[in-house]
């Protein structure tokens, strides 16, 4: 559901109104950045993919297939597709472990093991369906409430609860016997 | 059963944030521990991915600039297309102006009537991006059109240049986002900061510099104002300057003098020299950059095209234009590039070193304007091959859901169209091979979906733990039900069932035959 204000903003953006597109970027870029960052754990890559999300938005904003209900949900789906592409291309190992911050009280081996575990978990999330990975990321990595996710995905809160349950079950199946 | 688990899981999720809280909650409800504890442990792992402190997105500002640059490019491409269409009213006004002073009066009356004297007056203080700005510019154009005295026209052009510069300063001062252009001399160059006509602009690696530009050069600057008040230069092009000077009684411009129009993406009528009625350039006066050129540059006003300045002994001159755009058509004699038709002949040099000349490719053209107004290409450089509009994409995945319009397979959603070929019957958990076309926004349009049936048969017996119309859980195993599943007996939770089926790639079983053992107690029918 879009407010009248957002509908007007998107209408202007479809006409390539620079101020409107700048406002959309200012409104959503940090959220999209956070989403990608949580999925990849790599700040430079998240910055680059965030820029790509908005360029893709611009390319497709006039398409009738762009979005039906939620504009922000559409942006998240573009971000999701880019993240999945990244994992499928096998580029998730781009970040060397030595770039992970090491807290002074932790042994470097523990840090390395934790980062590997996190990367495995991130890769597993990318094997979920689009909706499942969205709900997992928004709920557990970004801390959104069911109501917020429901609004963003254009679903009821009940549907989000079910989706979250199925997503966790599927994620558990994917990681299977792997020790996390 | 599943609904209850979902509800309890959702409730517990909010309470559990550590190993201790998880164990305490599970200890209170041991009956649910078996089903929910693994999921809750997974949730703790997921929460560990959550960073309290997300790194500052330092480069988001850079991404914003990239995006807005792209907007400018798209708008320019659109404007170029529009410019190629004949305007129904304005050119006819221009031709009217040339014909009769009587009609000038009529047109003046018409402008006042249509726009209103008040509207025109109110537009005087408008800035680029304001609704009345177009009125202001139209009024200025009109003023130029009806100014015939060469000296007065040059003076007016200089006033208008000054006005554009003041507008640029006002836009920067108000930190508004807008696109604008102005002209002036390059006063200062300091790294990325230039001063042109007293206006400070920022030049980046992406700024297009056209022509010989140095301190003192008269240039037109196209800028984009950013919300922090910066004027970011998109393009800076050397231009001939309108020079205010007394008329020379018998102008004798050197025959070698040539004129090169402002390089622009497409030839813009108001910025180009006249096509059909060559205008005698004003007396030649060396520009401040004349030391870098062998001949003095002629000057031209921004709107010289519409002015009927009496021609004097005009030497033949060559008017070059440069533009860039997508190749829309290629014939033996004429190409259409960025909406602009340009003739080619045996002398036209076509540079295909970077990409092959083809419809859709991006080309830059240097052409001369002929006496009949047409363009003859001197050089066409193919800069970039046609970008693929859509790219083939193939993948395999497990079917999660399907409808007449879209399927969710693996981690992808694919769009189903009338052209999509589907082989096999969809079932959740079955492996599907997909051939699709990826659109610019990442949308996948399915061309072919082949559903692979599992080969491994399984048979087991266990207690029915949950039942729905599409899925049962028998002894912890998910058994999917479809139209081909034969169910014998009356199923109910708690009863024992023998399951024969096919092992799906996700570990579930596609039930082919389920025999429910008879029970003495009444049982509900499946949902």
Image (cartoon, rainbow, N blue to C red):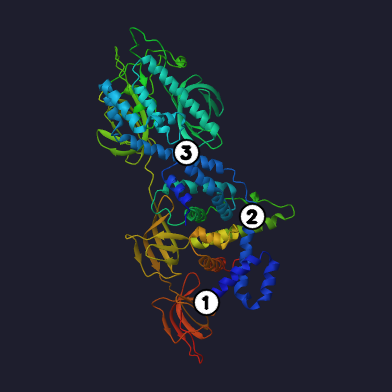
Q: Residues within 10 Å of mark 1 (few under 14, many from 20)?
A: some
Q: Earlier in the sequence, mark 2 or mark 3?
A: 2
Q: Chain of mark 3?
A: B
Would residue B49 appear left or right of B474 to someone viewing this image? right
Residue at far bottom of view: B520
Q: Secondary structure at mark 1?
A: strand
Residue under the image location 57 percent in, 71 percent down: B7
Q: Secondary structure at mark 2?
A: loop
Residue under the image location 38 percent in, 48 percent down: B389
Asked if B162 appears above or below A17 in the picture, the reply is above
Residue that label 1 marks: B477
Q: Nearer the viewer, mark 2 or mark 1?
A: 2
What percent of the width, then of the height, locates residue B133? Answer: 43, 32
What percent of the width, then of the height, locates residue B176? Answer: 52, 36
Q: Nearer the viewer, residue B436 or A74?
A: A74
Q: Residues within 10 Å of mark 2 (few under 14, many from 20)?
A: some
Are the residues under marks 2 and 1 on the same chain? yes
Q: Is residue B48 visible?
A: yes
Q: Earlier in the sequence, mark 3 or mark 1?
A: 3
What percent of the width, then of the height, locates residue A117? Answer: 62, 60
Q: Earlier in the sequence, mark 2 or mark 1?
A: 2
Q: How many marks?
A: 3
Q: Chain of mark 1?
A: B
Residue at far right of view: A105
Q: Nearer the viewer, residue A67 or B451?
A: A67
Asked if A37 appears above or below B464 in the picture, the reply is above
Q: Chain of mark 2?
A: B
Q: Determine the CA span between mark 3 and mark 1.
A: 55 Å
> Residue B69 bears which disc, if any?
3
> Residue B51 bears which disc, if any?
2
Query: Are dots 3 and 1 in contact, CB under 8 Å?
Result: no
Asked if A5 appears above or below A110 in the picture, the reply is above
């Amino acid at each position: 559901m879009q407010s009248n204000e957002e509908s007007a903003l998107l209408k202007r953006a479809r006409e390539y109104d620079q101020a409107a597109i700048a406002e959309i970027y200012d409104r959503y870029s940090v959220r999209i950045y956070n989403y990608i960052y949580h999925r990849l754990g790599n700040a430079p890559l998240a910055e680059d993919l965030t820029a790509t999300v908005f360029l893709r938005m611009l390319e497709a904003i006039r398409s009738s297939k762009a979005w039906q209900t939620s504009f922000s949900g559409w942006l998240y789906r573009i971000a999701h597709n880019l993240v999945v592409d990244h994992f499928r291309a096998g580029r998730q190992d781009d970040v060397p472990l030595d770039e992970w911050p090491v807290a002074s009280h932790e042994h470097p081996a523990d840090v390395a093991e934790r980062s590997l575990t996190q990367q495995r978990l991130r890769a597993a999330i990318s094997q979920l369906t689009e909706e499942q990975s969205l709900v997992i990321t928004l709920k557990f990595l970004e801390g959104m409430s069911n109501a917020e996710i429901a609004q963003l995905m254009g679903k009821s809160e009940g549907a989000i609860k079910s989706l979250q349950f199925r997503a966790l079950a599927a994620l558990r199946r994917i990681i299977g016997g792997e020790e996390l | 059963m599943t609904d209850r688990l979902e509800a309890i899981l959702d409730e517990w999720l909010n309470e559990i944030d550590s190993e201790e809280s998880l164990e305490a909650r599970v200890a209170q409800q041991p009956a649910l521990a078996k089903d929910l504890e693994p999921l809750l442990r997974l949730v703790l792992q997921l929460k560990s991915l959550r960073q309290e402190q997300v790194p500052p997105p330092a480069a988001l500002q850079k991404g914003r600039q990239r995006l807005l640059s792209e907007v400018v490019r798209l708008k320019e491409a659109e404007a170029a297309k529009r410019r190629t269409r004949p305007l129904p009213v304005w050119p006819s006004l221009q031709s009217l102006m040339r014909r009769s002073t009587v009609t000038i009066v009529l047109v003046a009356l018409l402008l006042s009537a249509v726009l209103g004297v008040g509207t025109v007056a109110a537009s005087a203080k408008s800035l680029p991006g304001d609704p009345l700005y177009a009125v202001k510019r139209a009024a200025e154009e009109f003023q130029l059109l009806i100014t015939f005295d060469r000296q007065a026209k040059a003076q007016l052009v200089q006033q208008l240049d000054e006005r554009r510069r003041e507008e640029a300063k006002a836009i920067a001062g108000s930190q508004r986002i807008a696109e604008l252009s102005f002209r002036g001399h390059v006063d200062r160059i300091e790294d990325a900061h230039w001063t042109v006509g007293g206006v400070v602009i920022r030049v980046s690696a992406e700024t297009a510099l056209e022509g010989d530009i140095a301190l003192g050069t008269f240039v037109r600057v196209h800028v984009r104002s950013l919300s922090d008040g910066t004027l970011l230069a998109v393009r800076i092009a050397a231009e001939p300057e309108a020079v205010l000077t007394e008329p020379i009684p018998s102008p004798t411009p050197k025959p070698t003098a040539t004129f090169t129009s402002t390089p622009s993406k497409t030839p813009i009528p108001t910025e180009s020299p006249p096509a059909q009625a060559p205008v005698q350039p004003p007396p030649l006066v060396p520009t401040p950059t004349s030391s870098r050129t062998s001949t003095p540059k002629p000057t031209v006003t921004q709107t010289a095209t519409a002015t009927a300045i009496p021609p004097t002994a005009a030497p033949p001159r060559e008017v070059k234009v440069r533009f860039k755009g997508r190749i829309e058509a290629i014939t033996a004699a004429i190409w259409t590039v960025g909406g602009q038709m340009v003739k080619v002949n045996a002398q036209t040099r076509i540079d295909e070193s970077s990409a092959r000349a083809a419809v859709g490719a991006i080309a830059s053209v240097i052409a001369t304007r002929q006496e009949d107004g047409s363009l003859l290409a001197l050089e066409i450089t193919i800069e970039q091959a046609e970008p693929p509009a859509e790219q083939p994409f193939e993948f395999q995945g497990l079917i999660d859901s399907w409808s007449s319009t879209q399927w969710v397979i693996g981690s992808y959603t694919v769009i189903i169209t009338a052209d999509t070929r589907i082989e096999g019957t969809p079932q959740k958990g079955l492996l599907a091979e997909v051939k699709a076309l990826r659109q610019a926004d990442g949308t996948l349009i399915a061309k072919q979906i082949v559903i692979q049936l599992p080969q491994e048969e399984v048979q087991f017996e266990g207690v029915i733990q949950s039942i729905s119309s599409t899925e049962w859980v028998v002894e912890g195993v998910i058994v999917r039900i479809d139209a081909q599943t034969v169910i014998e007996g009356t199923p109910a939770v708690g009863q024992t069932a023998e399951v024969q089926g096919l092992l799906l790639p996700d570990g579930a079983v596609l039930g082919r035959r389920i025999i429910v053992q008879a029970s003495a107690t009444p049982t509900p029918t499946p949902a």
